[in-house]
């Protein structure tokens, strides 16, 4: 008499991105409904130095506390070309993050009018980690490029969605361009999008599954007896 036991397998998702981040032209943003990173929901524990004390790092998360370009953040120019700018922040309680919208602006403009050297204050890449795990990487520009030449606008929106993760600690990292002397990246806003974790079976459902498997095993034993 032989008894065969069939093993059931289920797909397991480990926070893998659903698709590559998208980059589109965008105007200066308003607040995203349900923004998980809204200023009232976070504590900022560390950040790269800003361009001056006229900027406030909280403006990256939906406030207008700065006196120079209120609602925007510009990082220091002192780190030079290809610098890395990091902002670490914590939500007041764990959140389920399923994506983000990031709004950026450089000093280039479309057409013949230029507010600065095209590509100044741009980022060439962006990454986001949640509880120490990388959840998104976005390549934005080739070094020396600008938002206007690449996307047709000096203001862009970077969006990504991924398998939802529960976390409370986040690190946003921007890599600056090599165009100066205004190297510091300008960030208009970073918004967190809510996700939903895969459902966990109810105890009753698990019990029914176990009973069903047991019944199947008994049936096979009787047939082979």
Image: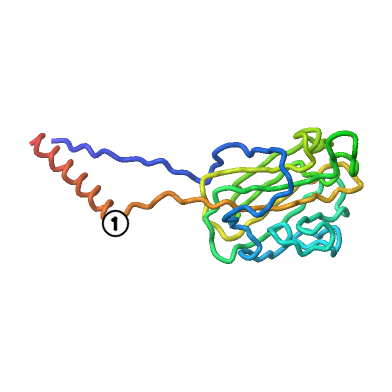
Q: Residue at x 33, y 52 (%)?
A: 201
Residue 91, given in percent of the width and then of the height, sits at 60, 63
Residue 105, given in percent of the width and then of the height, sits at 78, 46
Circle 1 is placed at which residue position?
Answer: 203
Quarter-of-image position of residue 143: top right
Looking at the image, residue 41 sits to the left or right of residue 187; the answer is left
Q: Residue at x 37, y 41 (%)?
A: 10
Q: Residue at x 81, y 54 (%)?
A: 74
Looking at the image, residue 98 sits to the left or right of residue 3; the answer is right
Q: Give the quadrant of the C terminus.
A: top left
Residue 102, given in percent of the width and then of the height, sits at 68, 48
Looking at the image, residue 83 sits to the left or right of residue 96; the answer is right
Looking at the image, residue 18 sits to the left or right of residue 121; the answer is left
Quarter-of-image position of residue 202: bottom left
Q: Residues within 10 Å of mark 1 (few under 14, many from 20)?
A: few
Indicate the secondary structure of the residue bearing disc 1.
helix
Q: Residue at x 54, y 49 (%)?
A: 98
Residue 217, given in percent of the width and then of the height, sits at 17, 42
Q: Give the quadrant of the N terminus.
A: top left
């Amino acid at each position: 008499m032989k008894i065969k036991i069939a093993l059931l397998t289920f797909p397991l998702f480990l926070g893998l991105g659903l698709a590559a981040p998208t980059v589109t032209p965008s105007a200066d943003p308003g607040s995203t409904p349900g923004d998980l990173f809204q200023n009232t929901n976070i504590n900022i524990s560390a950040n790269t130095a800003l361009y001056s004390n006229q900027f406030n790092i909280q403006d990256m998360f939906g406030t207008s506390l700065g006196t120079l370009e209120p609602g925007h953040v510009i990082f220091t120019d002192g780190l030079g070309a290809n610098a890395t700018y990091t902002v670490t922040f914590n939500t007041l309680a764990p959140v389920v993050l399923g994506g983000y919208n990031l709004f950026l602006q450089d000093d280039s403009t479309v057409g013949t009018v230029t507010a600065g050297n095209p590509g100044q204050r741009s980022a060439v890449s962006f990454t986001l980690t949640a509880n120490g795990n990388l959840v998104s990487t976005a390549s934005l520009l080739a070094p020396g490029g600008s938002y206007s030449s690449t996307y047709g606008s000096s203001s862009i929106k970077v969006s990504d969605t991924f398998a939802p993760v529960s976390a409370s600690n986040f690190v946003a990292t921007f890599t600056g361009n090599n165009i100066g002397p205004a190297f510091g990246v300008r960030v208009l806003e970073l918004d967190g999008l809510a996700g939903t974790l895969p459902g966990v079976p109810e105890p009753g459902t698990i019990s029914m599954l176990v009973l069903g498997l047991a019944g199947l095993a008994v049936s096979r034993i009787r047939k082979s007896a």
